[in-house]
Structure formats: C-alpha cells, structure tokens
Amino acid sequence: MNINFSSFDATDVDDIYAIEQLAQSHPMTKNVMLSCLSNRYFNARVMVDEQLAGFYIGEGVLDESSLIEICIHPDFQGKGLGRKLLAHYIEQGKERGFMSCWLEVRESNTAAHKLYQSMDFNEVDRRINYYPTNTGKEDAIIMSYFSFG
C-alpha cells in the first residue's frame, strides 16, 4: 500500500467534498469548505495507491492551530489512515511553529475520541448540545494538544 500526503486546492474540492458527504452525518457545506482555502488555513489529502482516501483542514491563528475537519472515506476506515493523517497534521503544525492545537469531536464519535487520546490530546471542556443529530443534539468534546514546538 503506497501512501502519499499532499495539499489540495479549489480544483480538488469536488472530490474532497464527496468524502465529507459520505463520512459525516452532518457535513459542512461546500461553500464553507471552499472558504477554508484562504491563507490562514492549511490542509492535506491522503492518497492510497493513487486513490483519494481522506483529508484534513487545519486553521492557524498566531501560535494556535485548530483542526477544522479530518475525514477518511468509509472504504478506508479502520486501516490506520486516520492516525497517519492526524500525525501529518501534527507534524505540519510543528513546522508552522504552533504551540497548541484545539479540536472538537462529537461525543458519539468514540473511535475518533480514542484516536485523539492515543495521540496525546486531552479533553479540556464540553460544549453542551452543540452538534445536531438526527434526533436532537449532542455534546462536543473539546480537546487540546500542547506538544507543538
């Protein structure tokens, strides 16, 4: 399995957005995704044997980064690509000189929560009833990573 990381731009958004729609119960809009291509954002896609398997979008402000989105195509989930993509994001944060990273994860997304914890993210707070669900709302778990730099 040949794995490559590279940044993406507006010409790639249709393919990136297709993964967003497949993998997320409540995907961001395409316009929001396009707005995440401005200067303060950075991103990467992961290709497996020339096939798009996932992506992340990060935002940097001063010395902090926020992981806006990380997403793996359902056909590639459970193969360790989320871990590799998150490791790439952390490495990019270090290269950009960020001192911390922040993210939010749905309370029901236990696989992502465990992944973040295994990579030294710590739960610091919650946003009660933050995310919409098909039956109401659920909490967002706020997590941080302070080993950049």
Image (cartoon, rainbow, N blue to C red):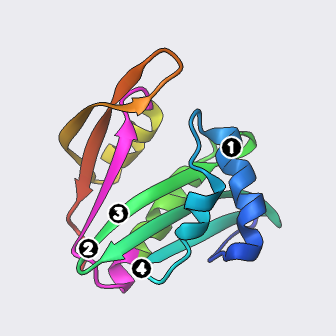
- Asked whether residue 97 is drawn in magenta, I would say yes
Tell me the element at label 3. Answer: strand
Report which residue position mark 4 lands on: 40
Specify the quadrant of the image occupied by residue 144. Answer: bottom left
Q: Are marks 4 and 3 in contact (CB under 8 Å)?
A: no
Tell me the element at label 4. Answer: loop
Q: Looking at the picture, does residue 104 appear above or below residue 95?
A: above
- Asked whether residue 105 is drawn in magenta, I would say yes
- 3D distance between C-alphas at marks 4 and 2: 18 Å
> Does the image show residue 39?
yes
Residue drawn at x 31%, y 45% as measured from the top left: 117
Report which residue position mark 1 lands on: 21
Residue drawn at x 70%, y 55% as measured from the top left: 17
- 3D distance between C-alphas at marks 2 and 1: 31 Å
Q: Are marks 2 and 1 in contact (CB under 8 Å)?
A: no
Report which residue position mark 2 lands on: 148
Percent across and percent down for residue 145 are 25, 59
Could you tell which of marks 4 and 2 lies nearer the N-terminus?
A: 4
Q: Looking at the picture, does residue 21 appear above or below residue 17?
A: above
The one of 73 and 12 positioned closer to us in this rendering = 12
Tag 2: amino acid: Phe
Report which residue position mark 3 lands on: 66
Most distant residue in the top direction: 135
- 3D distance between C-alphas at marks 4 and 3: 11 Å
Q: Of circles 4 and 2, which is in front?
A: 4
Q: Is residue 130 left or right of residue 79?
A: left
Q: Which residues are magenta?
A: 93-109
The one of 34 and 79 positioned closer to us in this rendering = 34
> Does the image show residue 55?
no
Percent across and percent down for residue 32 are 55, 59
Q: Of circles 2 and 1, which is in front?
A: 1
